[in-house]
Amino acid sequence: MSEEFDILIVNGLIVDGAGSGAYRGSVAIRGERIAEVGGDVRGDARIVLDVGGLAVAPGFIDVHNHGDLSILYYPEAEGFLRQGITTFVGGNCGTSPGPYGDYLGYAYFLYDLFCDVAPHMYYLDRVLPRDLVNERHRELYGWEIDWHTMGEFFKRVEAKGLSPNYVPLVGHGEIRTLVMGQDYRRKATRREVRRMQEEVRRAMEEGCRGLSVGRDYEPGYYADLEELVACARVAARYGGIYTSHSLRTGLRRERRPGEPPPPKAKGVQEAIEVGRRCKIPIQISHLSPLYDVYPAGSEVMTEASVKATLKLIDDARREGVDVSFDVIPHHLTGGIYTSPWLAGLLLPWLRVTGSRERLAQALRMEEFRAEIKASIMSGKWYGLNPNINPNWAAEPTIVSCREERFMGKTLAEVAEMLGLEPIDALMEVLARDPDTKAVRRGDDDSAKLMFYKHPEMMIGIDTFALDEKWECRHPPWYMPNENSYGGLPRYFRRAVRETKTLTLEEAVRKVTSLPARKFRLRDRGIIKPGAYSDIVVMNPETITDRGDQLEPRRYPEGIEHVIVNGVLVVERGRHTGARPGRILYRE
Ligand SMILES: [Zn+2]
């Protein structure tokens, strides 16, 4: 017996991804493609899903993601699928799972492992011998990171299978590490740049879709414009894209008092210049307002900053540079990890003492406090640097503490209560209760919403493929960022339902057909006959993220079914275990 269709979705509100008006109808799937779409699709199907009026949209495409390495460890990527992501772009911020030589760049996903093999106080050595990493990797996982090229890595991923589709980029940082090893804190020679070009060429030949740079990180920080242009030229020749984690906050290393942070706008201008010179499409990663406003919270000033930021983008577009950008949905806690422990602000000393309890004990010594303070004021620790952010104490709000009177107060308020400077107040609170928890408060996401309106805006959750149990063993006991589970639902909740900043159709377009066009993913990001059937069935009335800074590891609500390449991966809100995802190689 053979039914006409494999899956028939009936009674849906079809939001096609192109931005056209939603309409009632059905979607019929045969094999991996959409067979028919419309108001009167008839026929037998192996699986019939009556979705009772819910929205049927193309699967979401997350353009800024770091799931590429972690997909080997968590091939089902439940955090992605449960929020409707059917395709993610990996290899961003200059870091990818290859090409590797004798040294490995620090893989953030393996934070615990890197802490084990390279104990450090302030900053980890970002480039470590592969053998050293593998010794511990074998103990932890029973296998080694033994591949070299991206092509070899792809074979690993395909052998294991994966639930979502993966669009690979190659990281400039990885290539720089391969060519320069541990001697990377300098300008590359012309010969080295030529070798980098050769590696870009190889990665593109193996199927990568572009090159990413991580200009805040080692070793990418030490590159100059000529090197970036030389590498981007090769990617451009293959029709690739250039994604830029631009110079925003400067190198994540010490910054002395009086040493001003580099203007953020310069970083974006640099990426645009690469686009101009190489005629390569540019994606500005995780864009935020490029002009800081102190004190934060003034709507007029925020709007001025966002407008000036978007003007940079629009001017370049008018000039013919194909530049677009992505935004991380959570307005407070973007980034890959989050930690609720206030003690995390003193991470270097937390590392050395080994536990919150022992840190509190050490804080009873006046000399210890004085040393910490001197170190912080000298700008040694980028995680807490009043020279860069004089208002740092206004951010952490205490939500759990043995001292009742500190509850609900910001550190700045506690400092005032105690008549102490904020750093002293921080140490005092931790000495009294090392297990104090703090969150970043504030519901002002007005800048995000302003960015959402831009026609070339896309979404990137900036996280790993993980499960709902993952957490770090080492201080500050990181947990995955909330976006790992609920970034897209949060975007729909805020942009569409609560603020009506975007229509449902427009919000869907920005995470489907728009990124598909930019990354040249043919027949994806759209619901039409012949397109791949990557589909999300969602409830726009209830869709919401559920995690918070204290417990981010919660799956969202409102995502009913998710189909990847014609296979149900999420059915009635549950992951089916299916791994129909593919690596979407350069065509
Ligand atoms: Zn980044």
Image (cartoon, rainbow, N blue to C red):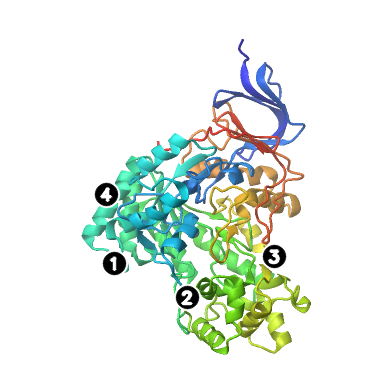
Local SS, label 3: loop
Quadrant assignment for the C terminus:
top left
Mark 1 residue type:
Lys
Q: Are marks 1 and 4 in contact (CB under 8 Å)?
A: no
Dot 4 corresponds to which residue? 198
Quote the CA–CA distance across marks 4 and 2. 34 Å
**Residue drawn at point x = 60 percent, y = 41 percent:** 81
Foreground: 261 or 361?
361
Query: Secondary structure beneath disc 2?
Result: loop
Instruction: Pick whichever of labels 3 and 2 is earlier in the sequence.
Output: 2
- Classify mark 4 as within 8 Å of ligand 1 or not, answering yes or no: no
Q: Which mark is residue 444?
A: 3
Classify mark 2: residues with Cα within 10 Å, few (<14), some (14-19) or many (20+).
some
- Give the label on residue 261, or none: 2
Cα distance between the residues tagged 2 and 1? 21 Å
The amino acid on which the numbered mark 3 sits, given as a three-letter code, is: Asp
Viewer can see residue 572 = yes
Mark 4 or mark 2: name the one nearer the start of the chain: 4
**Residue 294 locus on image (x, y percent):** 61, 77
Amino acid type, mark 2: Pro
Which label sits on residue 187? 1
